[in-house]
Amino acid sequence: MRRNKVVGVGAIALTLGLALSACGTTEDDNGGGGGGGEAACDLTLAFFGPETGPAAGLGQPIIQGAQLAIDQYNEDAECEVNYELFDSQGSPDEAPSLATEVAGDESIIGVVGPAFSGESAAAGPIFAEGGVPTVTPSATNPTLADNGWDTFHRALGNDATQGPAAAKYISETIGAEGVFVIDDASEYGAGLAGIVEEDLADTVVGTDTIQAGDTDFSATVTRVNDSGADTVFFGGYYAEATILIGQLRDGGFDGTFVVADGVKDPAYLDAGEAAEGTIITCPCIPATDPGVAEFAEAYEAEFGEEPGTYAAEAYDAANIFLDGIAEGIDNRADMLTFVNEYDEAGVTKQLSFAENGEPSEVHVYAYTVEGGEIVPEGEIS
Amino acid sequence: MEFDYQFLFSNLPELTITGLAFGAIYALIALGYTMVYGVLQLINFAHSEVFMYGTFATLWTVWALTGTGGGVGGIQLLLILLLGLVMAMATSALIALALERVAYRPLIKKDAPRLIALISAIGASFVLAELMGLRDKVTAWVGLDDDLDRYVSGARINQSMASVVNMPDVNIGGLSIKTVDLLVIAAAIAMMVIVDQFVRRSKLGRGIRATAQDQETAALMGVNPTRTIQYTFLIGGLMAGAAAFLYMLKIETTKFDVGFLLGVKAFTAAVLGGIGNLRGALLGGLVLGVAENWGQALFGGEWRHVVAFVLLVVILLFRPTGLLGESLGKARV
């Protein structure tokens, strides 16, 4: 979603970790530490992702989404579930030591996260080794599911599903005749742009790559105008997108600008007039969707703001673990089995996972910038 | 790899002008590197932050005077921009002078090796950049973060003054050119000429050149070295401030670490033209800007930086002292 600026590479999406921990009232078994009984006591769910740092704004809705689920559960639970935040600052460098800490805390039974793809890749092996079940509400790099970590789960569609949806929107809804594809050379941006380019095949009239951190895109603008494209797709983050669209409009490009979830951030609106009409695709459910209405209301009541990007996904992720706790699960091994076999309706979608941890149901939504706001347009189907 | 000659040649005028515009900004920043090097044989790595503070001075001035609504035009906008330029130049000059006082003078006084000053410069660069990147936290300590919210929030992300200035395009011989590009090129060249003439003709400029040639002898002839070094930093800071203003006019967006890449490029431009040489800085900046744009057109965007640095290496291979390769001290009247 947002770039981890320190590294200069964007970590793609947010991942959250909720770790639940078992209470340890009895002997350790299964490396989990368990207390018997109906619903287990003194368990902890962990959030793993940015609470501070450059991407803190993206961590916030996830932290709060999971918080809401836990608060609702605790309201009428005999034994309250604890909620612990592990602040990675969204950085892959911080992730391994934090993940080791999580794995070492026997009371943590599940993780909502990690929030970004970069930190997910770094922390994944440690969680897998420690047997800590994770459900990420935001990390969208497709390769994360290919590592054979049995603890990895994803509560939203990955970039491999977002790309085709974006391509479909461009060819069917916009009816583009000439598409210019730009990427930012990041794992996220280049991957996404590659998929869009492949799917659109003949309608692609040109491609170019920009460098993250660059601010002068005049040569790219010239190239776009020269190609006669009526639509530009940009795979990358909002920092470059904001400047790029400004320079494209200044340069006389008046077609449609299409971007993906990496740009779905209020900071993109800094581009002002130039941003108007931009189409943003995102596997995140709009707060106005009837399915999440109840959640959105509760969220607003508790935090005084509309649910941000991936808050609903985090709420779902936390609820998977909480359902397990309610059933009396008190150790990581049982929780992992529970999550693997989970098949219930969440607020965002029917929640169940394939063998590799990918969600079995995926939705991608289109948003558009209108009147200085990012407004949902509907699902791309 | 495909060479897209056709695209390059059919769009040559446009690519050249946008390249010159960005190159002019490189050149103005390069001036600061080159002057300090000429006088002190020291690479002032913190100069990129001097530029960065200038961009924020422009941004905040424009924000403060246009309010939240924007929509200012005509004479009023012109005055606001003029004030933005003055603020940027003043801020950058102040930062440059502070740098000289805090990070360099104590070392130079003790006759520390140049390497020590270099480390000091890198340290100062980090401190200045992070101070800007942590401005929300810094102001929170003194309890001003609520009053200054607009200016300090989002300290680590891009801040923008987009849609404040909208200038119509100029049409020259059927070629549509952005006014801002022409303005940037003209302003940069004008300022370079002024500085060049100042250093060549004024008494102070003579002092700077004398100190660059031989500090001790110059001191014996009555040139105050400390004062001269101060002026050198001052001029470099003023030009970086002007560059910052022009940059904001063109790009409209800044961030606490914006100086890094531009600093590297400007330093490259200075070396390309011949470090220590004022006219070299101008030539190096313009050549670099155009080469980057042409290179991108020919090879694609991922090669932009590669082209810039390959060009540097090739030129240094044949002209080890840069294109104009003559030092500040040797400049003749």
Image (cartoon, rainbow, N blue to C red):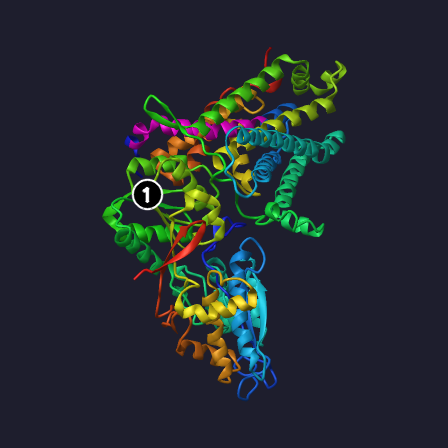
Q: Residue at x 30, y 50 (%)?
A: A197
- Between A70 and A336, which is closer to the camera in this rendering? A70
- Is residue B299 found inside the magenta-colored segment of the image? no
Please name the amino acid that badge 1 sits on.
Answer: Gly
Image position, residue A267 (x, y; %): 49, 50
- Between A266 and B308, which is closer to the camera in this rendering? A266
Vertically, is A375 above or below B175?
Answer: below
Image position, residue B114 (x, y; %): 67, 32
Quadrant for residue A347, please give it: bottom left
Left or right of A201: which side holds A262?
Answer: right
**Extreme residue in the bottom direction:** A37
Vertically, is B190 above or below B294?
Answer: above
Chain letter for the residue marked with disc 1 in the picture: A
Residue tagged 1: A255
Camera sees residue B332: yes
Query: Magenta span covers which residues?
Result: B7-31
Left or right of A167: which side holds A145?
Answer: right
Q: Residues within 10 Å of mark 1 (few under 14, many from 20)?
A: some
The mark tally for this picture is 1
Main SS class of the magenta portion in the image: helix
Image position, residue A325 (x, y; %): 51, 81
- Between A50 and A375, which is closer to the camera in this rendering? A375
Quadrant for residue B303, please give it: top left
Quadrant for residue B304, please give it: top left
Q: Quadrant of the C terminus of chain B?
A: top right
Q: Quadrant of the N terminus of chain B?
A: top left
Image position, residue B90 (x, y; %): 64, 30
